Amino acid sequence: MARFITELKRTHTCGQLTKADEGTEVVLYGWVNNRRDHGGAVFIDLRDREGVTQVVFEEDVRPEVHDLAGQLRLEYCVGVRGKVVSRGGNANPKLKTGEIEVHASELEIFNRSEPAPFQIEDKIDTAEEKRLQYRYLDLRRAPLQKTLMTRARVNHLTRNYFTDQGFLELETPFMVKYTPGGARNFLVPSRLNAGKFYALAESPQLFKQLYMIAGFDKYFQIVRCFRDEDLRLDRQPEFTQIDVERSFVTQDDIFETIEGLVCTLWKEVLGVEIPRPFQRMNFDESMARYGNDKPDLRFGMEHVLLTDLVRAHDGGGVPLLKEAVDAKGIVKGMVVPASANLSRTEVDKLEELVRGMGSKGLARAKVAEGGEWTQSPFAKTITPELRLALTAACGAKPGDLLLFQFGKESVVHTVMANLRLHLGKKLGLIPEYGSGGTWRFLWVVNPPLFEYDEEAKQWAAAHHAFTRPHDDCLQYLESDPGKVDCYRYDCVLNGFEIGGGSIRLHDPAVQARVFKAMGISDEEARAKFGFLLDALKMGAPPHGGIALGMDRLVMLLTGAESLRDVVAWPKTQKGTDLMTGAPGDVDAKQLRDLSVKSTAEPVKEPR
RNA sequence: GGGGUGUUAGUUAAGUCGGUUAUAACGCCGGCCUGUCACGCCGGAGGCCAGGGGUUCGAGUCCCCUACACCCCGCCA
């Protein structure tokens, strides 16, 4: 008998064989996906990353091979040699290779498998905790195999796209100097410099700008970034960005580059043509209509800003509304169509939801025939004039339900944005993945450069301090910083921010004014960003760029519901790796070498 | 830092008003079976009900604490 692996090389994958291969002698390698032992004949579904092929072991052909096949169990790793035979009337239409099967003449068990902690199936109910603990088994499942293969394809397509257009793939350091502002950094103690720390790069931002200054005018990188912030469904502590920077460009040039990439990905991976150019929306408009800067445009239920109306009616007899506008808060409303037919209990549940997000409550009103409000805390006190004006402004018809939020601007926006998304999902307004026409790309543009930090009583960079203000706003830098818009842009898809970037500030004089507006002294600026400020004075070209969240792109391309489903080895919500146990303890000597001492209380071990 | 949900055989779940031996399916072990593909049939093993404390004659079930996981707010230039 010939030997597997050394002599018998794999001839086909398990997703490959068809009727056309009938009569061919083949060698397959893979895992036992399922077995059906009929005594005289053993059926095995053999699985590799390409698919599943049925293998048959018959008693009267090779008794010793049949006997060995009888020992096979789920997830055994095996090699099989045999002949491709048509299944005739026994074809399985559910299987890509269902028209044929392999009649085995040789079998080798490379490795047996203990019973797996969960069964390796496409659809699985096993708790994610258990799946993450045995991630290498979870990754054997077809949906995750497919996702990671898509991910590899995205990497490949991205490299080709940029390389073909003359971009250089250049690397940047992960271990960098800590710079304040922005995301919290992971820190790495320096053994050779006691008491000093590297930071893990939260993005290649400054280095890619320095590449521009160095003259590498078209740069890209598929790069890991690290942020020590609290995690979410769509946030991991280490994640991958498609990072891009160009010199001598406008915002529109960046948009063209990125739209080209995204359209290539959607065409090649999904076969979908995305219309260009992408829709654009001003930041202010997005906040007003959707409550955030990453609106999901796949459904309506837009917000209506009612602040001016309420102020014009001086609260309309409702003390809470008057208080809100008097305190410089805002008022927003939203219409839930009559067809939604929400019960009293369901609306109470919504109220619970918004309380969890910092809201004091959920004011509501059901519009009756004739414009009366019912089921509303405002119904008795509100003036008819304001009531009719609000109903009209929201475009509500009899039977519709009005929902209101009022008070502090940021809370109202957040609560209303989440309420809209929640209702969109609950009422089935969001088309399912793959149903077509569901890719709503959007550029959110022209946000303010600064936002006011209430605690510090100080204007601060809304994104980062190196974003270029609009030229026609420069006059307000000193007098009214809140009025300064900038060349910052976010690429949004179906409610996810898939990328963000800006045209950078390359003019040292304007840079100095921006720092001044933020109350950053020359010395402070020098201490924090000295090397970049120096570089900007050395013939820095006009430049700008963007970073796309690669994991999120793959998530959207594959219809995955969580970032953890598109990252091979993800962390839990507390940033731990359930498989390896990271982060772990280190011994006292290691800490001494690093001049590091932990102040953490020893963890009480449960006994 | 805050709010919420959950934790019962290897896995997924059921478990009534607090009541005496904690069920089922799949998987696992043994046996039978040549056309199955969610194969079938017969038999079997498998549990500190997350951990700790309390209430009670009696706790999987009620209360408190802790751990872990998940979702959200804050945070994420």
Image (cartoon, coloured by chain):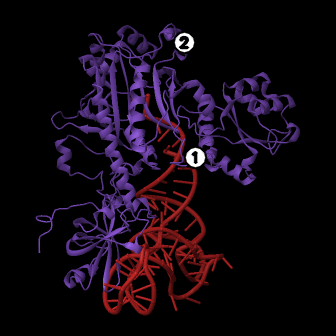
Chain colours: A purple, B red
- Left or right: B75 as drawn, with respect to A583: right
Tally the marks: 2
Give SS at disc 2: loop
Of the numbered discs 1 and 2, the one sitting upstream in the chain is 1
Q: Position of residue A219 (x, y in %)?
A: 29, 26
Q: Looking at the image, is A100 positioned above or below residue A412? A: below
Q: Please tell me the numbered disc located at residue A459.
A: none
Q: Position of residue A575 (x, y in %)?
A: 37, 48
Q: Nearer the viewer, residue A239 or A444?
A: A444
Q: Position of residue A408 (x, y in %)?
A: 63, 31
Which chain letter goes with mark 1?
A
Q: Position of residue A48 (x, y in %)?
A: 29, 61
Residue assigned mark 1:
A431
Q: Which corner quadrant holds the N terminus of chain A?
A: bottom left
Q: Is residue A231 visible?
A: no
Q: Looking at the image, is B15 positioned above or below residue A125? A: below
Dot 1: within a 10 Å radius of its alpha carbon, few (fewer than 14), some, or many (20 or more) residues? some
Which chain letter goes with mark 2?
A
The quarter of the displayed image where residue A145 is located: bottom left
Which amino acid is tagged 2?
A: Asp
Q: Which corner quadrant holds the C terminus of chain A?
A: bottom left
Q: Nearer the viewer, residue A447 or A39?
A: A39
Residue assigned mark 2:
A480
- Left or right: A383 as drawn, with respect to A510: right
- Left or right: A32 as drawn, with respect to A475: left
- Left or right: A197 as drawn, with respect to A433: left
